[in-house]
Amino acid sequence: MRNLTNEDYKIRILKIRADTGIWTDVENVRVQANIGNWMTAKAILMELALGGFVTAEKTSESRIFRRSNDSPVGRTSASKTKKLSGGQNL
């Protein structure tokens, strides 16, 4: 079995987030994306938030995340396609 890269995890997270607009915490995303480390999941989610792929909101304990309203995940329009740092289209 090959080791997954951060880009692989980003794709997994975005696919999970594309299915719902519900706010989700880091632990829930970590479990759904099968990421072993909470800090890794949080770091990837923060990268995705900085890139505009997900929205992050600070709570009293941590942050919660959801798919951005302007995120192209799940859209078919090629004109609004964003790319991850590895060059993969979403």
Image (spheres, helix red, strand yellow):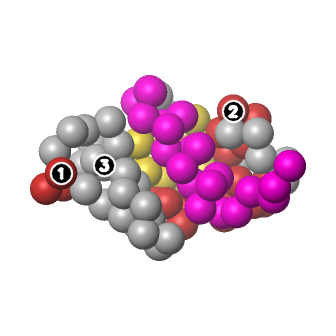
**CA distance for labels 1 and 3:** 12 Å
Mark 2: few/some/many CA within 10 Å (<14, 14-19, 20+): few
- The span from disc 3 to disc 2 (Cα, nearest Å) is 20 Å
From the top left corner, tell me how far across and down residue 63 is, in percent.
60, 50
Mark closest to the chain's N terminus, 2 or 1: 2
Q: Is residue 82 left or right of residue 34?
A: left
- Which residue in the structure is indicated by mark 3? 71
Is residue 11 rendered to the left or right of residue 61? left
Instruction: Say the numbered circle drawn on residue 88.
Output: none
- Residue 7 in the image: x percent, y percent? 59, 61
Q: In the image, what residue occupies the spot 42% across and 35% down? A: 18
Mainly helix, strand or loop, the magenta region? helix
Magenta region: 1-21
Pick the front one: 52 or 80: 80
**In the rendered view, would you say 79 is above or below 33?**
below
Is 19 within the magenta? yes
Could you tell me which residue is drawn at 64 percent across and 52 percent down?
9
Residue 27 visible from this viewpoint = no
Q: Which residue appears farthest toward the bottom when viewing the image? A: 85
Residue placed furthest toward the front: 1
Identify the residue shown where x is 43% and y is 61%.
88
Report if residue 12 is visible in the image: yes
Q: Earlier in the sequence, mark 1 or mark 3?
A: 3
Three-letter code for the amino acid on which mark 2 is drawn: Gln
Q: Residues within 10 Å of mark 3 (few under 14, many from 20)?
A: some
Can you identify the residue that label 1 sits on? Answer: 78
